[in-house]
């Protein structure tokens, strides 16, 4: 399986605003800046992984109460 999916936190200052996965970090950062404000940035979590593993991580983040696209 291809390791082409990135796990990330979108942060404003030290605060995590959003947690998610993507195959294009730059595009996703631009989308979040439009939605949440221009001063945020993406912090990549770990290395690129498989989509299945990234989805598992994302579910774990949601279970911890982190804001994700799958609320």
Image (cartoon, rainbow, N blue to C red):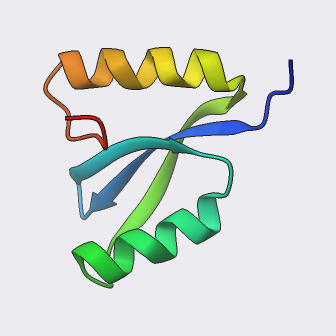
Q: Left or right: where does residue 59 sit relative to residue 62?
A: right
Q: How many marks?
A: 0
**Above/below status of 35 relative to 70:** below
> Where residue 67 appears, x then y in whole percent?
20, 41
Looking at the image, the residue that sits furthest to the front is 70
The quarter of the displayed image where residue 70 is located: top left
Whether residue 37 is visible here, answered yes or no, is yes
Looking at the image, the residue that sits furthest to the right is 1
**Above/below status of 22 relative to 25:** above
> Where residue 14 appears, x then y in whole percent?
23, 54
**Above/below status of 29 relative to 43:** below
The quarter of the displayed image where residue 20 is located: top left
Q: Left or right: where does residue 17 sit relative to residue 57?
A: left
Work out whether residue 45 or residue 18 is closer to the camera in this orientation and state it.
Answer: 18
Work out whether residue 20 or residue 10 is closer to the camera in this orientation and state it.
Answer: 20
Q: Residue at x 19, y 35 (%)?
A: 71
Work out whether residue 13 or residue 27 is closer to the camera in this orientation and state it.
Answer: 27
Q: Quadrant of the N terminus?
A: top right
Whether residue 39 is visible here, answered yes or no, is no
> Where residue 17 appears, x then y in whole percent?
22, 54
Q: Residue at x 36, y 55 (%)?
A: 10
Q: Residue at x 20, y 16 (%)?
A: 63
Looking at the image, the residue that sits furthest to the left is 65
> Where residue 6 appears, x then y in whole percent?
62, 39
């Amino acid at each position: 399986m291809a390791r082409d999916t990135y796990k990330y936190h979108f942060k404003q200052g030290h605060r995590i605003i959003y947690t998610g996965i993507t195959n294009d970090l730059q595009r996703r950062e631009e989308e979040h800046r439009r939605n949440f404000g221009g001063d945020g940035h993406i912090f990549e979590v770990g290395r690129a992984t498989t989509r299945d593993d990234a989805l598992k991580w994302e579910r774990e983040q949601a279970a911890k109460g982190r804001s994700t696209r799958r609320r």
